Amino acid sequence: MSPPLSATAREDSTPVLTEARPASFPRWAGAVVLSPLGVSYLGLDDEGFAHFLRGTGAPFASVGALTFLFALLSLGRWGLRVMLSQKHPYEPWLWDHSWRHELQDQRLTQLLVSWPVSLVLLAVLAVVHWLFYSRVFSQGHVLPGALLGLVLLGFDIIIFTRVLGPTVLGTLALLRFGRMRLLLPGVPLELGSRCQVHLEARSLARMSNVKVELRRIREWAETTGCGDERLTQSVTHIEHSHTYTVDAAALHEGKALALPLELPEGGPEHSTALHASRSCHWELKLSSEVSSVHLDTTFVLPVYYVVGGHPARAS
């Protein structure tokens, strides 16, 4: 386990410990960038490599070039954050994440993950149903087929209500309302302070208020057992939660909705630490009690313990 970063306040010499540290080295990017050396080590010269590209076609070469470029960007971003962490060890908001004053909601990212999962589940269901109907009912096993059909129907209902339904509703909400934005007064947001953040969204009809939940979440990996019975699982714990409602009249008029934010007092251990052994992050969850509105989005906030009370603001 890597030791936590240590920092010293400007006003005194008391060490301040924080779990925040830069993200680990992107090994996949390093492997991609070093792959040409591996090719040359295997004895594939320039002419042979060009012949290989012609044989695999332009699509493969284009994907490979984009992957190589993305790997270079990832390595450059990682190196920059490491240098910033060494230069500003007690200002992790400058290198822990690419924080901006304007935060986008996470619905698009979630849909990019949930749609491939949904399509794979649909393909598996289609194959299972085809095998079931072609082999069971074609052989005249009506009663056993009906019982198995009820079991399959139960699985279908669970998959459609838990996976496909939310994915479709989330897509419709994104197309209807667009991506929502949260405007921050600055970066970082300081523990023990009061401020206002502003939500920008398209007009949300029929919504009288917005339910706001501010929470601090701690996550870590926990290993139990040993040998072949060793099991590692992710543990999520909500350490702080505060819920309130805000009148949504401003959203009806197409204006930004002001959300008061009261951050509790806390020390460095309550600061955002996205890449620690026990990661900590703050979430602002926004929802509506009107089911037809589909307002259900979460923003991750840059909440940090500020040494000396005068932070160097991130751009």
Image (spheres, grey):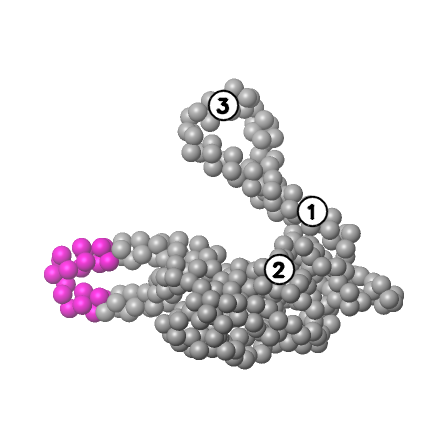
- Residue at 13%, 65% in the rendered image: 142
Query: What kind of residue is marked 3?
Result: Ala
Q: Nearer the observer, disc 2 or disc 3? A: 2
The numbered mark at residue 200 is none
Measured in 3D between alpha carbons, the distance from the residue under mark 1 to the one under mark 2, in whole angstroms, is 20 Å
Horizontal and vertical percent position of residue 29: 59, 42
Residue under numbered circle 1 = 80
Nearer to me, 175 or 203: 203
Is residue 86 shown in magenta?
A: no
Horizontal and vertical percent position of residue 303: 66, 67
Query: What kind of residue is marked 2?
Result: His
Residue contact at pointers 1 and 2, CB within 8 angstroms = no
User: For residue 282, what is the image quadrant?
Assistant: bottom right
Inspect this view and state whether residue 106 appears. Answer: yes
Residue under numbered circle 3 = 50
Residue under numbered circle 2 = 101
Nearer to me, 157 or 178: 178
Q: Nearer the observer, disc 1 or disc 2? A: 2
Instruction: Give the quarter of the figure containing the C terminus.
Output: bottom right
Q: Residues within 10 Å of mark 2 (few under 14, many from 20)?
A: some
Mark 1 residue element: helix
Q: In this view, does 33 lie above or below 220?
A: above
Measured in 3D between alpha carbons, the distance from the residue under mark 2 to the one under mark 3, in whole angstroms, is 46 Å
Please tell me whether the stretch drawn in magenta is mainly helix, strand or loop: helix
Highlighted range, magenta: 129-149
User: For residue 134, what is the image quadrant?
Assistant: bottom left
